[in-house]
Amino acid sequence: MTDPLQHRLDAALRLAGVASGRGTLKGWQDWVTEADQTIERFLSASLAAAFPDDGFQGEEGGVSRGGSLRWVIDPIDGTSNYARGANRFCISIACLEGNTPLIGVIAAPTVGETVSARRGQGAFLNGAAIRAAETSDPRQAIMEVGWSRRRSAAEYLAVCERVLGGGSSLRHGGSGALGLVDVAIGRLDGYAELHINLWDVAAALAILREAGAAVSDFLAADGAPDGNGIFACAPGLAEVWSDLPGLPRALTAD
């Protein structure tokens, strides 16, 4: 008998690959309507056909179906990069049961990378196992701090100053999902953002846990409907960066 979760993971991997070719950009003003909506409609219809009892929530259309399992989709994370012809964008597909991420698939088509995870089964980059970095010295660390218009410039700069003050380097790549995935892979030692939405992080939450990263409880309180701050890092830096201003602590997996 087919494992229901493996069946869903296989479907998510397949659909992420197909969806990567669905978005087209006609012009500067069309990047949301032409790309995001096209991909989201395709994924919604495909997942409804394959799993009619599952719920669905997308960045563009919100919650359109209910179910004990629900798919949470960001059709393009890093839309500004995409609109300008840069390669740092991705498609994010997650499956949750309540507030527990079970499956995460993040596909970055222009660089040919797909990162995936299933709860309890590990995390993988193009089929090869991944783990968060073993960094424990902040002077050797690289942190990405994402920008949110829901928080002030002063709050954002306070986080940056705290990271720089500890001797770490800073990055900003324009895609929260890929920033979090880079922590899972070990390319970054931390990712922080003062406010971000569920669809941006749902798939990454599953991947980070399976890769052994420390990650904050994004889904606490009203994180699922309203968004929340997020902080993920190499486990050896969780205590060092436990006091980032305005951000929750990153916790290691049980």
Image: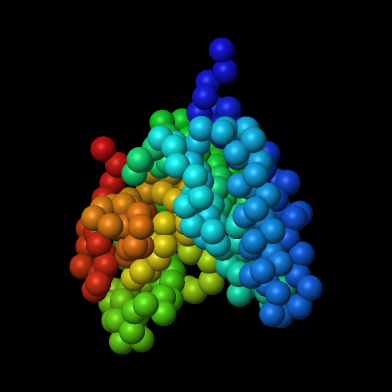
Q: Quadrant of the N terminus?
A: top right
Q: At which x and y percent is residue 25?
A: 75, 70
Q: Is residue 158 left or right of residue 140?
A: left
At which x and y percent is residue 177?
50, 59
State the colouring used for the structure image. rainbow
- Residue at 55% x, 48% y is 93
Residue at x 60%, y 39% (from the top left corner): 48
In this rendering, the answer to whether 6 lies above or below 14 is above
| Figure check: 235 above or below 69 | below
Left or right for 211, reference 43: left
- Residue 148 image offset from top left, x and y in percent: 41, 75
Quadrant of res 29:
bottom right
| Residue 170 relative to residue 247: left or right | right
Instruction: Name the residue rendered at 58%, 27% in the picture.
Output: 7
- Depth check, front residue: 189 or 16: 16
The residue shown at (35%, 57%) is: 225
Please tell me in which quadrant of the rendered image residue 223 appears: bottom left
Above or below — where is 156 with respect to 179?
A: below
Nearer to me, 172 or 237: 172
Q: Is residue 145 visible?
A: yes
Left of 162 or right of it: where is 23?
right
